[in-house]
Amino acid sequence: MHRREVFVTRTGWLLLLPTGAAAWLFHRAQHNTLFWLAVIVAIAQFWSLGIMHNHAYVRGDPLEASDWVTVINMLSTLAGLALLLWAALA
């Protein structure tokens, strides 16, 4: 694995940290609905990250990934950041 591939793979995982932190904070505060919402958003992030990773490294063409998968990844990442902000302020 090349140096750039390791960096891109690790940065993809870093995007899951805010959503995981939001889920943990909601769980600690016993906000069950928001906890499960954060878990669903994290699953969407992980799923779309996996599809984009497969297109980039297994098939060899990162531009082959569908636009809608990229949109789902970006929206779920933004939703995870919003949930983290909400959890921090709650």
Image: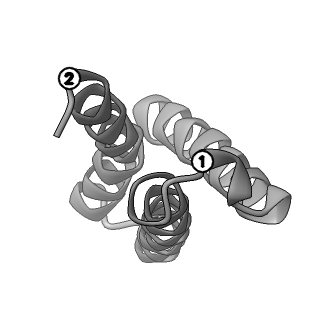
The x and y percentages for residue 83 are 55, 46
Residue at x-position 27% and y-position 26%: 7
The x and y percentages for residue 87 are 45, 42
Q: Secondary structure at mark 2?
A: helix
- Marks counted in the figure total 2
The x and y percentages for residue 71 are 78, 53
Which color scheme does this rendered protein use? one colour
Residue at x-position 54% and y-position 47%: 80
Can you identify the residue that label 2 sits on?
3
Mark closer to the chain start, 1 or 2: 2
Farthest residue toward the right?
A: 67
Alpha carbon separation for disc pair 1 and 2: 16 Å
**Amino acid at circle 2:** Arg
Please identify the quarter of the rendering in which residue 13 is found.
Answer: top left
Q: Observer-nearest residue: 53 or 29? A: 53
How busy is the neighbourhood of tag 2: few (under 14 within 10 Å), some, or many (20 plus)? few
Residue at x-position 49% and y-position 72%: 47
Circles 1 and 2, Cβ within 8 Å, touching? The answer is no
Quadrant location, the N terminus:
top left
Asked whether, in this view, residue 77 is left or right of residue 19, the answer is right
Q: Observer-nearest residue: 77 or 25? A: 77
Please identify the quarter of the rendering in which residue 58 is found.
Answer: bottom left
The x and y percentages for residue 61 are 59, 52
- Give the answer, above or below, for where 3 lies relative to 21: above
How busy is the neighbourhood of tag 1: few (under 14 within 10 Å), some, or many (20 plus)? some
Can you identify the residue that label 1 sits on?
62
Residue 45: which disc? none
Residue at x-position 71% and y-position 58%: 64
**Amino acid at circle 1:** Pro
- Give the answer, above or below, for where 68 lies relative to 76: below
Q: Observer-nearest residue: 9 or 77? A: 9
Asked whether, in this view, residue 73 is left or right of residue 14, the answer is right
